[in-house]
Image: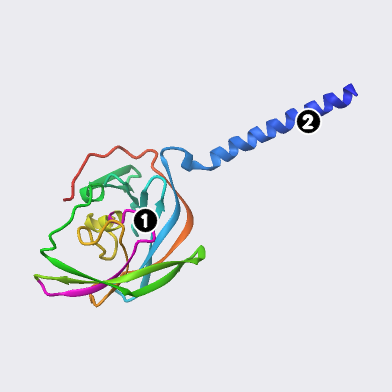
Amino acid sequence: MGTVFIRLLFVSIGLLGIWGSLYAQATHAFPYRDESNHYFPEAFIYQYTDLQGEYQLVWLCYNPDTREMLYIPNDDMLKAVISYPNGDYIGYLIDENGQKQTIRHHISEVSETETSSHHDFYQLTARPQDTIIRYREYQHNEPIISWAIDITYLKSGEKESIYVTEDFDINTYQIYGFNRLFGDMRLPFSLDYIGILTKKQMVTDIKNNPYQTAKFNGHTATVYHFDTAGYPETEKEDTN
């Protein structure tokens, strides 16, 4: 009886050692638990037409807990641009000497309290009966409903029709703010409705605008990590 007990005790100790080792490995295997590693479990996908007339996709990865949004530019040096909920946009790059650098811009409207506009420059006409329905890629039974809004720009007389959705709990100004950055930190298509739409209204389609080819392609689950370890701190720089 005593021998059996001792054997069971050693087995239990051995299992605890294995579980402890596995736990340590599992903790190490998830780098987003470290402050320098940013984890993005979902993505908003936009489609646009490039200068050669080819369809291209842009993934805007998102973390609903930290409210951070990540864009990966098509650039050898600029590895990522992260939009932070306080209005900061930080570009993480590695120069030709292999040195890590950062570029910081600040878009104040992203974090400021939304205020009503006098609409001196545009007029909005909602058409809620005109809707477009898509389905989430990883939850096919959940529709994404967008409705139409006609925008008339009063000074130029130009008009466009856009479709917007409020089905996502995000600050859409973080998406639009990418278009107020410089160089390759900007999105490769124009999508800026800061001050025109509310922060809840995400554009999914644009009609009657020959200069605009952006279109919401889908929303999906993903697993993406970006490690900011070794990048220097940035100085504040306002773009507006």
Mark 1 to mark 2 CA distance (whole Å):
49 Å
Decide: few, some or many residues near mark 1? Use Cα within 10 Å; few <14, some 14-19, many ≥20: some
- What residue span does the magenta drawing correspond to? 156-173
**Quarter of the view holding residue 152:** bottom left
Name the kind of residue labelled 2 in the image: Val
Magenta span has 224? no
Q: Which residue is mark 1?
A: 72
Which is more toward the observer, 150 or 92? 150
Q: At numbered mark 2, what does the secondary structure look like: helix, strand or loop?
A: helix
Tell me which numbered mark, 1 or 2, is placed earlier along the sequence. Answer: 2
The residue furthest right is: 1
What residue sits 55% from the left and 42% below the top?
29
Instruction: Give how far across and how far down residue 50 sits, in percent.
Output: 31, 71
Question: Can the viewer see residue 45?
Answer: yes
> How was the colour assigned to the protein in this rendering?
rainbow
Q: Secondary structure at mark 1?
A: loop
* Residue at 30% in and 61% down: 201
Check contact, mark 1 vs mark 2: CB within 8 A: no
| 210 sits left or right of 10 in the view | left
On screen, 46 above or below 81? below
Above or below, comparing residue 195 to residue 85 in the picture: below
Please tell me whether mark 1 or mark 2 is closer to you in this view: 2
x then y, percent, for residue 228: 38, 42
Residue 163 shown in magenta:
yes
Q: Which residue is mark 2?
A: 11
Q: Residue furthest top?
A: 2
- Is any atom of residue 50 visible in this view? no
